[in-house]
Amino acid sequence: MILKIENYRPSNLDVILDFLNQNTKLYTEDSIFGGEGKTTYTNSGKLHIDYPEIFGEFCSFVLSNFEEEYIFLDLWSNVYSKGSFVKPHSHFSEEYPVGKNGVFYIKKPKDSGNLVVEDQVIDCEENDIVIFGNSDMHWSQPNESNEDRIILSFNIIPI
C-alpha cells in the first residue's frame, strides 16, 4: 500500500533546506545512483539522531500518520543533479521485515523525475511525502531539469 501525503510543509522547511545546502561535506556519491547523484547516507544516515533540532518536527509528523507506533531507523538526504536517478532497489531486511520507507520532496523542479514503486509512477510535487513497504522495489526517473531535485529518504519500523 502506498500512502501519499500532499503539500506538507514543516514550519522549519527553510532551515532544513539551508542545512542540506550548506553541509555539502555530508554528501558522497554512491553506486545506487545513475548519473551524479549524491547522498548523506554514508556520512550521516541518521539525520534524525545527529540533528534532532532540525529534523524532529518532520519525523514527528511522519509518525503521526500511523495508528501503530513506529520509530525512525534511518533518515538521509539525496540530491539528484541533471541526468541523475536512483537505480531499482528495496530496503527489505530480515531484521525488519515489516518496515516502511518513504521520500519527502523538499525541492522538486518541473521535469525532475518521479518516484516509481513496483512499476507504478507516483506523480510527486514539491512538499509531498510518499510512504510504502520496505519490500517494494522502487527507483526514480532521471532528473531532466537543470535544477537539483532534493529529497529526504527514510526507513521506519514498528515498535
Image (cartoon, rainbow, N blue to C red):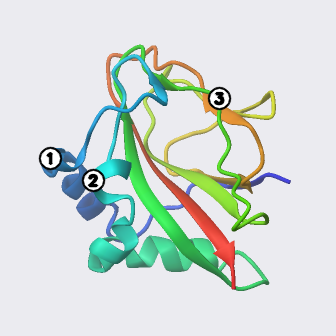
Query: In the displayed structure, does residue 7 sit left or right of residue 22?
Result: right
Furthest residue in direction right, as rendered:
1
Residue 88: numbered disc: 3
**Callout 2 crowding tier (Cα within 10 Å): few <14, some 14–19, many ≥20:** few
Residue picked out by circle 2:
43
Q: Is residue 22 above or below residue 36?
A: below
Give percent across and percent down for residue 87: 57, 26
Instruction: Give the number of the mark in front: 1 or 2.
Output: 2
Query: Given the image, on which type of amino acid does mark 1 rest?
Result: Lys
Q: Dot 2 lies on which element? A: helix
> In this orientation, does residue 49 appear?
yes
Q: Quadrant of residue 157?
A: bottom right
Q: Dot 1 lies on which element? A: helix
Give percent across and percent down for residue 60: 52, 80
Of callouts 1 and 2, which one flags the residue occurring earlier in the amino acid sequence?
A: 1
Residue picked out by circle 1:
25
Query: Given the image, on which type of amino acid does mark 3 rest?
Result: Pro
Quarter of the figure that contains the N terminus: bottom right
Q: Are marks 1 and 2 in contact (CB under 8 Å)?
A: yes
**Callout 3 crowding tier (Cα within 10 Å): few <14, some 14–19, many ≥20:** some
Residue 72: numbered disc: none
> In this orientation, does residue 115 appear?
no
Q: Residue at x 62, y 68 (%)?
A: 156
Q: Residue at x 20, y 54 (%)?
A: 18
Of callouts 3 and 1, which one flags the residue occurring earlier in the amino acid sequence?
A: 1
